Amino acid sequence: MTSATDTLPKTENATATDARPDIDPYPLSPYVAWAGNRNKDPILGVFRELFPTAGDALELASGAGLHVNYFAPHFPGVRFQPSDYDVDVFETIKAKRADAGNANVADPIRIDLTDPASWPAPEERLFDAIFVINIFQVAPVSIADGIAHLASRLLKPEGFVAIYGPFKLDGTYTTASNEAFDKEILAAGVTEWGLKDIRDLEKAAEPHAIVLKRRIDLPANNFILLFGEA
């Protein structure tokens, strides 16, 4: 990720019932907490159908650790590995783990999706599931290359990558509300911000033999994009 949000306030105090805070992609911001509390149950509903009863799951861009620590109790046989580019969030992830008593959540690790040297070694562990939530609104589409490259190294043969968020499709918005949301993001004037096109993610993944297998519609005009080995 870039350093565009390095100067943003580092707070986390929103709940699902609050009015939506101003858009702020810093992992510990009220906006990110609000969005996470809003989408965690719909995502969990899909993951209940997809996750194995036992295995390993890697979350990319874990941020404050809201999702990984919310999902973990529902999959006691799955070992969850949180990760993030920003090591400043690691203590928050650990604190949430302690509060939830999640023995199946590992210590967070640093992963830079642009730097393969920072990725886990495949000979140490492969993953049944790799997931990332709400990253592409504020990340360049080139990050999809890193996700697919990492997946080509770390996924088990029948494993999957789940990418959650709002997207465009074939250059068009899927809803008027997503168009309005995109215009709001773009108004910030940060180069890499804005909704990405599903087709561009597919193109980025193709050289790594990772392909889109399924698109799942979720509330609030978001999708889960399921990728896997070709």
Image (cartoon, rainbow, N blue to C red):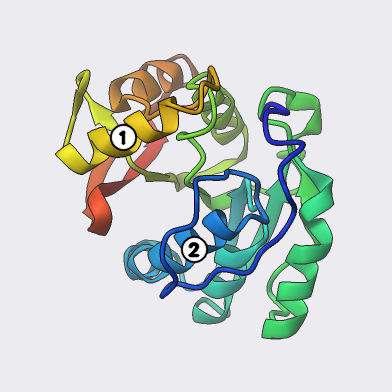
Are there few (<14), some (14-19), or many (20+) residues within 10 Å of tag 2?
many
Estimate the x, y position of residue 8 in percent, counting from the top left.
71, 43
**184 left or right, relative to 134:** left
Residue drawn 16% across the image and 38% down it: 176
SS of the residue at dot 2?
A: helix
Q: Amino acid at mark 1?
A: Phe
Q: Quadrant of the N terminus?
A: top right
Q: Report the front residue among 7 and 157.
A: 7
**What is the tally of numbered marks visible in this picture?**
2
Task: List x then y, in percent, for residue 214.
Answer: 25, 42
- Residue at point 60%, 52% (across, down): 59
Please give left or right for residue 108 compared with residue 141 in the image: right
User: Residue 65 versus residue 126: which sits nearer the camera?
Assistant: 65
Q: Find residue 45 and name its label.
A: none
Instruction: Answer left or right for 153 relative to 211.
Output: right
Residue occupying image coordinates x 29% and y 21%: 199
**SS for callout 1:** loop
Residue 47: percent from left, percent from top = 39, 64
Dot label at residue 167: 1
Q: CA distance from mark 2 to mark 1?
A: 19 Å
Q: From where the camera sits, is residue 61 visible?
A: yes
Query: From the image, which quarter does the C terminus lie in?
Result: top left
Q: Nearer the viewer, residue 89 or 178?
A: 178
Rendered location of residue 107, percent (x, y): 80, 62
Q: Amino acid at mark 2?
A: Trp
Q: Circle 2 is placed at which residue position?
A: 34
